Image: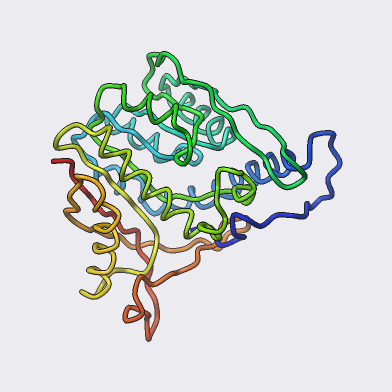
């Protein structure tokens, strides 16, 4: 998870605010750009470690994918290279632009549905309104500007589409202006960790509505290597709790080694053990953990 600042941080600007844009919207623009720039460093490290190929293997054979968040496009590109078609939901327009550029450079057709209208409420609060998505253009990848939290028109649109074979919720993160969105309750989501859990909760419920029978939800996080039964059961039990309000059945956990990058500009990751008994007593190894659930 992003450990740079919590979602409700960022009350002061550096460099000082000098534009004519309302301060809250200037913060939003600044931190969205910063997130895209920093995540590119992490994404390149994941690519170099072979993670995107490993992630894509989790949904092998499930052709039509709904992806929650595109980052700068490496996961989306890996899916397309593996023969999938992709509909992706992304809140950050700079991530959408980076992904569109990357996919187009590799010869894929990309369509973007821009829906956002941003409104300043005061110096430190903003609201995002989203119009209805409308008709879906034909393309190898459809990038939809939208939010995995509090975007009912998008939810209704997704439910009206042909059912997806799989939903991919991989390596969630968020920019530092996120907590200034009035749709985000910072009392319940004071940090990026809680934000990630709330988004995953929402994705479990959405997946239950949009997956075909037999379809998969793939959730991938970074964390302590699940090399003990206690840790494996803790991770699986956490996902079973998230799935408990749906028909989804948590099936398996897989992991692959992950080396955190320390390159300049990279995002840090806060390691959170799921249970007290899983707190490491020696050197910690990190992994990407993939939890797969199936729609009956």
Residue for point 18% across, 35% down:
61
Question: Looking at the image, which is closer to me, 131 or 187?
Answer: 187
Return the residue nearer the eye: 187 or 143. Answer: 187
Q: Is residue 67 left or right of residue 231?
A: right
How far from the left and from the top, in percent, is residue 51? 36, 51
Out of 51 and 233, give the one closest to the viewer. Answer: 233
Between residues 138 and 204, which one lies in front from this camera angle?
204
Q: Quadrant of residue 106?
A: top left
Image position, residue 226 (x, y; %): 28, 69
Determine whether 259 is above or below 138 in the image.
below
Q: How many marks?
A: 0
Residue 148: x %, y % from top left? 44, 40
Q: Position of residue 129 (x, y in %)?
A: 58, 29
Is 184 rendered above or below residue 282?
Answer: above
Q: Quadrant of residue 140?
A: top left
As displayed, is residue 112 above or below residue 122? above
Q: Residue at x 39, y 31 (%)?
A: 155
Residue at the (56%, 37%) spot, across then down: 92
Q: Which of the colour schemes (rainbow, by chain, secondary structure, one colour) is used?
A: rainbow
> As drawn, is 130 to the left or to the right of 83?
right
Please state if 32 lies on the left or on the right of 200 as rendered. Answer: right
- Where is the C terminus found, in terms of image quarters? top left
- Residue shown at 72%/44% (left/top)? 27
Q: Is residue 70 left or right of residue 114?
A: left
């Amino acid at each position: 998870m992003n450990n740079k600042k919590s979602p409700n941080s960022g009350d002061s600007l550096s460099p000082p605010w000098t534009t004519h844009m309302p301060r809250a919207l200037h913060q939003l623009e600044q931190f969205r750009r910063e997130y895209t720039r920093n995540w590119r460093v992490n994404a390149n490290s994941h690519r170099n470690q072979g993670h995107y190929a490993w992630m894509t293997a989790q949904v092998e054979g499930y052709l039509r994918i709904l992806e929650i968040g595109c980052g700068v496009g490496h996961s989306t590109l890996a899916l397309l290279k593996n023969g999938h078609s992709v509909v992706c939901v992304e809140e950050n327009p700079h991530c959408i632009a980076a992904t569109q550029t990357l996919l187009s450079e590799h010869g894929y057709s990309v369509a973007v549905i821009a829906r956002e209208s941003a409104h300043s409420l005061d110096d430190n609060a903003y609201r995002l309104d989203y119009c209805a998505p409308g008709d879906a253009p034909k393309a190898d990848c459809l990038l939809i500007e939208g939010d995995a939290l509090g975007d009912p028109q998008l939810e209704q649109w997704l439910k009206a589409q042909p059912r997806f074979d799989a939903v991919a919720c991989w390596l969630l993160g968020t920019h530092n202006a996120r907590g200034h969105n009035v749709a985000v309750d910072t009392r319940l989501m004071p940090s990026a960790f809680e934000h990630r859990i709330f988004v995953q909760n929402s994705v479990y419920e959405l997946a239950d509505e949009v997956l075909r029978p037999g379809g998969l939800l793939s959730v991938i996080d970074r964390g302590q290597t699940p090399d003990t039964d206690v840790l494996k059961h803790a991770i699986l039990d956490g996902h079973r709790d998230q799935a408990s309000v749906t028909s989804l059945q948590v099936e398996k956990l897989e992991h692959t080694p992950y080396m955190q990058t320390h390159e300049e500009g990279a995002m840090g990751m806060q390691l959170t053990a799921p249970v007290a008994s899983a707190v490491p007593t020696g050197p910690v190894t990190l992994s990407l953990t993939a939890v797969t659930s199936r729609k009956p």
